[in-house]
Image: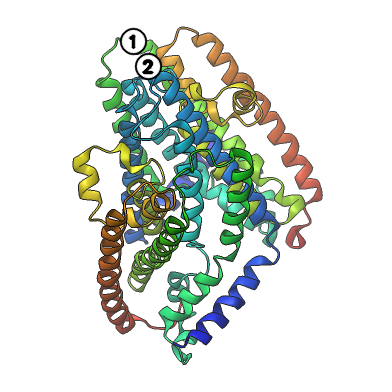
Amino acid sequence: MTRYFVLYVYFLRFSFSRAMEFRVDFFFRIGMDSLWYATHLIFFWALYRYAPFIGGWNFDQALVFAAGLFVSDAIHMTLFSNNGWMFPILVNKGDLDYYLVRPVSSLFFLSLREFAANSFLNLLLAVGILIWSIARYPGELGAGTITIFGVLLLVGCFINYLMHFLFMMPVFWLHNAAGMRDLFFGFGRFTGRPDGIYKGWVRRILTTILPYAIVVSFPTRALFEDDIAGIALHMGVVAALGFGVLLLVWRAGLRVYASASS
Amino acid sequence: MSVRLFLQIASMEARRRMSYRVDFWINSVAGFAAEFAIVWFLWKAMFAESGAEIIAGFTFEQVLVYYVVAILVGRLVRGTEFEGQPSEDIYAGGLNRYLLFPAPYFGVKYAQGAGALLPALVQAVLFGTVWLLIAGGRGMEDVTLLSGAMAIGALLLANILYYLMAYALHLVAFWADNVWSLLVALRFASGLFGGLMVPLALFPDGLREANSYLPFRSLFALPAETLLGRITPEAWAFGMGVGSAWVLILTVVVRVIWRRGNLQYSGIGI
């Protein structure tokens, strides 16, 4: 475990030093994400001018949800997004070899090698918005509930990571993951709306097979609803099953991986 | 640049875009389905939980039709904004060969962009037809031949306007290594203030008034509202006037950036 921690610290140092070489892009990225936060807040504000509740949540609750979405997105962009982006390229070029010969888990190395230092600043900004949205919430929110919310938000981020990489894994067989990548981000829009709006079989799919609706909505529900144990159990089961499936597909993919000819 | 050359470049690009695009079509259908599903559920919830039959001048059917049109208009206006674009040419040094062409760089790239719109045009016709078959014209009672003709004019203006906005940001690549973030930022801002995320009627009067002088409204809301017969000919003329003024302003801006950028350009690439 210590070895992995030390390795990760090296990843961080390398990523920060590289990010500072491209300073303009560093600030462009911060501006871009700040604008994304602003457009989302205005979006919810505009909608709530006409409806007191959406998906069972009032405006104050939707603000916490939106802030949770920013944090979840920032974590994904900081830790996983670049790695998910690079993964198909590594497979196609045969550069995955360099990851497979390392004396550490290749999936760990592949998933966390690139740390997006420019997105890290956005993570701080997103956390600030989350703290603000919780602080301004008019109802009573206990420290314990907020802690559970934070933990479940991290579980949601893990589920999002699992989906991202599961969408990328077909590159071992298809040799082109551009379509799958676009699908992952296209379906990702489901994450950005309260899960309470989804009904019927769409809801069942979005909370199980394609669990986009639970990434941020379920942690937020844990903050405002009583069934915390049920929500935590649901997320835990989805995360565990998703991780199991990812490992299975990863191993199956490695069996067909033929280095540069993939 | 001659019209013939423009059409030849556009035709070549269109043929290229229509081949080997299975993943593109899967994404287009799935992406459209996802976007529409979110809109449907969101607005269903809004109407149900507000108890209103009309929100900001839209019935449920009308708002769905608005989004269908706006989404398709969005694809026609934005085109393939991240593929084969000027910033790549500048960054990788590929601009060199274009500088030797006996045609202006902007004209060649815009012709390529116009050709690349063919898949989006096919999508618009296809999805629009499917929608008509499913919805049977509900929420489209005010669509007329005149509104269609006016919408086509608005669409052409929107396309050149968005291209100029994106082009200006691409040219920042003369000084910066990566302008992807700027283009995504444009996407966010245009999505919200252009009427793709929500109909602009949801904004309060002051914000709507201010927004009507910005270039964003001309991008998606103007063509969509025009087609659906939701605005008067006077409002359409005003929108076209504002959009045209922004085209002129951006043309000047782009020329200035291009000239200054060219002085910087080394032609070496990465």
Q: Which residue is mark 1?
A: A142
| Residue A31 left/right relative to A178 | left
Write down the quadrant of residue A160 in the picture.
top right
Tell me: residue A217, above or below residue B138.
above
Q: Residue at x 53, y 9 (%)?
A: A229
Write down the quadrant of residue A53 in the picture.
top left
Q: Amino acid at mark 1?
A: Gly
The CA span between labels 2 and 1 is 6 Å
Q: Position of residue A121 (x, y in %)?
A: 33, 43
Q: Residue at x 49, y 38 (%)?
A: B64
Secondary structure category for the residue under label 2: helix
Badges 2 and 1: C-beta atoms under 8 Å apart? yes
Residue A177 seen from this side:
no
Q: Which residue is mark 2?
A: A146
Q: Residues within 10 Å of mark 2 (few under 14, many from 20)?
A: some
Tell me: residue A229, above or below residue A82.
above
